[in-house]
Image (cartoon, grey):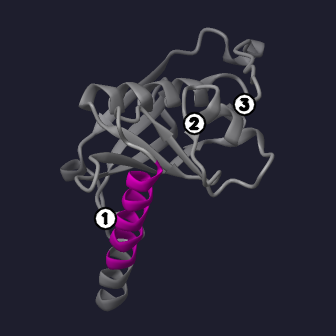
Amino acid sequence: MKEITISMERPAEFIGLDSEITHKHPVETEPNEYGARMHRLELHIGDAPVGYAELAYLGKPVPTYYLDYMHVDPQYRGVGFGSELIDQINAFIKSKGKMGLLINGISEGSPATGIYLSHGWTETANSSVLVYNVPEGVGEVELKRVRKHLDQWLDKTQGELDEAA
């Protein structure tokens, strides 16, 4: 695995800005584009929301938090705020004692992949799938089952949204 270094030095306009990340439970969130309610971690600089992550919980076959989406506004990228958000995602997943799963829709070679790898996420045999906090004894067979369950959940969620339209 290649080593990745992320610079945390911030340009002058970002020095002294306080960031805060808040958690919203699915019952407190609006349904996403697929009609699903997710855990939402929101990154704020002062009073302004500048980024967020959405995670869905899948209870089987291996209890997993699926990182569906992470976003930091373009003007706040490259100065450490994305790293802060990933650190909070990791802390949330670990506090629940579950595994994290990311189906990496990022193009190969993108620096966005590196930020996950530098924060403890690892690639599986399928390099488009990244995992975090994998329980002892969970191997590729179980990860394939988790991926299949996730695909079924996504298909069902999308189908319910299509039927409602």
List x then y, in percent, for residue 58: 28, 54
Residue type at mark 2 is: Thr
List x then y, in percent, for residue 158: 38, 78
State left or right for residue 141 relative to residue 161: right
Q: Secondary structure at mark 3?
A: loop
In the displayed structure, 10 sits above or below 28; it is above
Find out whether the residues at labels 2 and 3 contact each other: C-beta distance under 8 Å.
yes
Residue type at mark 1 is: Ala
The mark lying in front, picked from 3 and 1, is: 3
State left or right for residue 28 relative to residue 108: left
Q: Residue at x 43, y 45 (%)?
A: 139
Q: Residue at x 78, y 45 (%)?
A: 110
Q: Which residue is mark 3?
A: 1
Q: Residue at x 55, y 27 (%)?
A: 120
Q: Secondary structure at mark 1?
A: loop
State left or right for residue 44 relative to residue 73: left
Q: Is residue 29 magenta?
A: no
The mark lying in front, picked from 2 and 1, is: 2
- Say the numbered circle drawn on residue 36: 1
Q: Which residue is mark 2?
A: 122
Residue that protrudes farthest toward the right in the picture:
109
Given residues 107 and 149, the one toward you in this image is 149
